[in-house]
Image (spheres, rainbow, N blue to C red):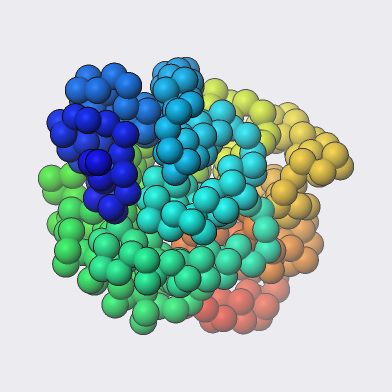
Amino acid sequence: MLTDRYGLGLSTASAAARDAYVEGVDLFLSANFGSEDAFARAIAADPGFALAHAALGRTLQLYAKIDAAKAAVARARELAANLPQRERANVEILATLVDGKGPAPLAFALEHLKEFPRDVMVLAPCTGVFGLIGFSGRSGRELEQARQMDDLAAAYGEDWWFLCTHAFALGETGRIAEARKLIDRSLAIYPRNAHGAHVYAHVLYENGEDAAGLAYLIEWMKDFPRNAQLHCHLSWHIALWQLEAGRIDAARRVFMEDVKPGSSWGPPINTLSDSASFLWRAQLKGHAHDPAAWREVRDYALKEFPKAGVTFADVHSALAYAGAADNEGLQSLVDQLLERERTGKLAAGPIVPALAEAFGAYAKHDFTGVVDRLQLKLAEHERIGGSRAQRDLIECTLIAALAKAGRKAEAARLSVRGARTRSVAAA
């Protein structure tokens, strides 16, 4: 029986289909462009190859090609009926993800991984700050992620993808030295892993090595395709480091060319969150408000996330409404969030509407209102998902609000609490 790169059996008699599938998985895991084409070639070589259809569906989902993704996993389900248990479960988990069944796939995936820990296409969506655990809304989800990866390390050994993903989980819990060792090993094995470059950037950020991080990403991205999944987000990291270095023109150029709606090739959640957070951080640094840019991001939020339901997107939609001075849109979002909380549909809890209201208060220069909303909820911001680097925006907003409310001593104490919290103008 043919096997994948992780030694798991594949129900195809076509070596060409297997090879294309393995290539597609590696491109998918490294966030490089071409996985969609590779999975399509696997299907062309063997139209009955269920796992290739399922993997294609997952790839299409990440690029927000939802109708095509659903069609792909529907075909995968049809083909999987008589497959071995491992492959049936692989198809069903990926199909359930594409269906958007909320938290249901996580329990299924974690149970499956007990028996098949090296089923990487099942493990991958459980990992990372945008994964099923990362977006679970649970307190302690960063430690949960790190423990999961610690437990699976023996099963993966020196696999470049696992080393990279393990490093990210450790870095997000403050285990920076361990994370540095793992990501160095991962990139030595597979230097063109975009997720690896991303994790390395986070490790440098957490360690306060801004100049090194900026230089590394600029060099690494010289031949990285613009239509690759992580191009937008890696560009966002460059823009933030340029902003931190005081090079606002360079930062804005990256934003305009590679991050904002219409220029980004990234998934909608990256385009929205990276665009809104860049504009907000630029203002926190004291740079001019850009009404036209904010309206463009607000319009994008309305188009891609018209209703509340994806917490990390909801938080950044709130930023977009606040930045665009769209008080009506922001209030509508807050009302939806409060209703979801009331009906038990807001996994991350009351911090989500509190953040939305705080951003609105900041835009109206109600800095005491910002402080009142954020101070009580600050310890819970892990629950919204995303990385520590992304959520630094919350602390930066609170620091700026404290300073502008005349509480500069409190702002100073919060500013020195951690080296990561910067990007705030002197007030």
Q: Residue at x 57, y 81 (%)?
A: 417
Quarter the C terminus occupies: bottom right
Q: How many marks?
A: 0
In the rendering, at what x and y percent does residue 14 appear? 19, 29
Q: Residue at x 40, y 78 (%)?
A: 176
Query: Quick check: can you spot residue 225?
Result: no
Q: Nearer the viewer, residue 354 or 403?
A: 354
> Going by the image, does 254 lie left or right of 332?
left
Q: Is residue 385 above or below residue 326?
A: below
In the rendering, at what x and y percent does residue 52 appear? 32, 31
Quarter the N terminus occupies: top left
Q: Residue at x 44, y 79 (%)?
A: 175
- Residue 186, located in which quarter of the rendered image? bottom left
Q: Nearer the viewer, residue 425 or 274?
A: 274
Q: Nearer the viewer, residue 99 or 296?
A: 99
Query: Quick check: can you spot residue 149?
Result: yes
Q: Residue at x 51, y 66 (%)?
A: 148
In the rendering, at what x and y percent does residue 281 appear? 48, 54
> Going by the image, does 361 lie left or right of 315?
right
In the rendering, at what x and y percent does residue 270 appear? 44, 41
